[in-house]
Image (cartoon, coloured by chain):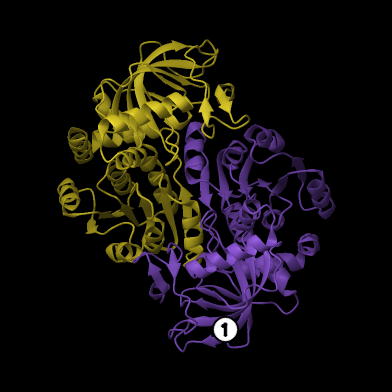
Chain colours: A yellow, B purple
Amino acid sequence: MSIGLRRVIEPAGVLPQAAWKLDADPRIAPDEVRIRVQRLNLDAASYRQLAQKHAGDGAAIRAEVLEIVGTRGKMHNPVTGSGGMLIGVVDEVGPESPLAVKPGDRVATLVSLTLTPLRITDGLAGWDGLSEQVPAEGTAILFGRSVVGVLPGDLAPELALAVYDVCGAPALTDRVVRANRAATVAVLGGAGKSGSLTLAAARRAGARTKAVVLNEAERDALREAGLADEIAIADARDPVAVSEAVGEPADVTVVCVDVPGCEHGAILATAAGGTVIFFSMATSFPAAALGAEGLAADVTMLVGNGFVPGHADFAVDLLRQVPAVRALFEARIAAD
Amino acid sequence: MSIGLRRVIEPAGVLPQAAWKLDADPRIAPDEVRIRVQRLNLDAASYRQLAQKHAGDGAAIRAEVLEIVGTRGKMHNPVTGSGGMLIGVVDEVGPESPLAVKPGDRVATLVSLTLTPLRITDGLAGWDGLSEQVPAEGTAILFGRSVVGVLPGDLAPELALAVYDVCGAPALTDRVVRANRAATVAVLGGAGKSGSLTLAAARRAGARTKAVVLNEAERDALREAGLADEIAIADARDPVAVSEAVGEPADVTVVCVDVPGCEHGAILATAAGGTVIFFSMATSFPAAALGAEGLAADVTMLVGNGFVPGHADFAVDLLRQVPAVRALFEARIAAD
């Protein structure tokens, strides 16, 4: 089943995610699917880097996104290494595609933009450059081996996209909590999108939940939502502050803060024999590996895999069943 | 118990591993230990980067190591983010140190050089810059919460250091194979130090072993050692080649190749529901996370934690019990 090797222009021999440049030609191979793009959802770390680099100048941010997509054939931020997702309408399905979609389906891609051949045709004219949500016209390609979700009829597309964007985190947290019969779960960045879904998943899996958030506003919003049994304020990049905020070390700690430097706080906040799940693309592999070694910390550290079978339905189901999570998402989208 | 915060000069509030600069003052606090340094063992990825940057010019490599240690107060390669280990003799033990060492003990530090305050006093005069093994005089500091191993009397110090350097890999592999009752283990870089120990550990834990090596020389050496049930030649950076070399996907795949770009091959070589353990400091967190997502690969991905309780004794025990591993290590050290 195709993993998109034919779309790799350079360097030869790597997979599309690792490629510098993809061929975004809209003509599809027999096992590919073409999507008419409607909206990109940039990865938070990627958008933040662009916004900081250009000091919030929307036109400059837009120009750089166009430059990246034009140069690389995909929206793969070369600094952060991250991408995002998109929504659109299925345009053409190759006769050999194994994906369960048909022309006209409104879908979200559940694989990263860093491996999705993408062509933008409207110059992003409908985007002011000031938000992660990017209205866009163009085409995207899905390979045979891929993941795509048809948008649920009862959710606004922006809401479904925001949920799908982080749907790996609650599904993997559920799996880890149940497999380890974890009694306590700490979530760094508990008030965010992946954080709030992760808190809801951890509680449904039977764990007591502790959230670490950045400030009073986040604490108040999360308290009102009632998703965490305990909430503390700390800078996730300050390991001692995180450790004190969590108190009794957690069986499982989930990092949902998309800024660099959260590895050591997460390790310190986790009990011996426990598990840290890193869901931030800003995670440094050497900082995690060497940090745990340096602290003589016997913790299992997981690279947060964005794919768990059934993850999209799992997250949408959580959103439907836990109104407080839905309210947090809707408030975030409205503020965006 | 001290984790060395008092040694951090900048930036404030981070742990020593994350610090840009440490205070390497040889005067110890009550819970610290001072070691008289005899030899550094640079991390393979770090040494390779330095050697490539300076095109094998030993004097220039030596000058940069001195520059790094002088500037940062530790041997923490700013490009690779990695360090290495050291051996030396315990010089002074603070009255409140919990470590089981006494003055005069010949020891290896089992925490990374990236968090070890280090002062070099001989200008590395005994080192030609052409090897990872660096004879050195100076002082190093261990914090209260640290890991240190007294060198075994029956092993040459260079041999013990080489084993300790990679001792996390066989111990974690043993744990993962047993916990998952894994039937097959693939090791990328099976002919290297961590690779050969990992193969031996996987087999002792009951798994059938497959090694992927770079060339005929490595294959022949490994075949003679008899550590792997199957051996195939492939470039670990070529995902399709790795996948074909491994054949039937493995339950556990261990990455012991210290070059960038091995994430996708390891993921492709692993069965659904299986586990990838990344032991290379050259691992890219986003490449692993996004690669698995893009491949719709339901694999558990572990950051190879350099600390597992009892890891040093475990690795030395393997070396003593499996003469072929010892022979491979001794050949590597002789060639170094």
Q: Residue B293, position in %: x, y?
A: 47, 35
Q: Amino acid at mark 1?
A: Val
Q: Is residue B112 in view from this perspective?
A: no
Q: Nearer the viewer, residue B300 or B307?
A: B307
Quadrant (top left/top right/bottom left/bottom right) for the C terminus of chain A: top left
Q: Residue B62, position in %: x, y?
A: 64, 65
Q: Is residue B236 in view from this perspective?
A: yes
- Against B236, is A16 above or below? above
Q: Residue A313, position in %: x, y?
A: 35, 31
Q: Chain of mark 1?
A: B
Quadrant (top left/top right/bottom left/bottom right) for the N terminus of chain A: top right
- Against B131, is A87 above or below? above
Identity of the residue drawn at 74% across and 44% down = B214
Residue receiving disc 1: B101
Q: Quadrant of residue A310?
A: top left
Identity of the residue drawn at 53% across and 68% down = B69
Q: Quadrant of residue B195?
A: bottom right
Element under disc 1: loop
Q: Residue A321, position in %: x, y?
A: 24, 36
Q: Nearer the viewer, residue A90 or B318?
A: A90
Q: Quadrant of residue B159?
A: bottom right
- Against A61, is B129 above or below? below
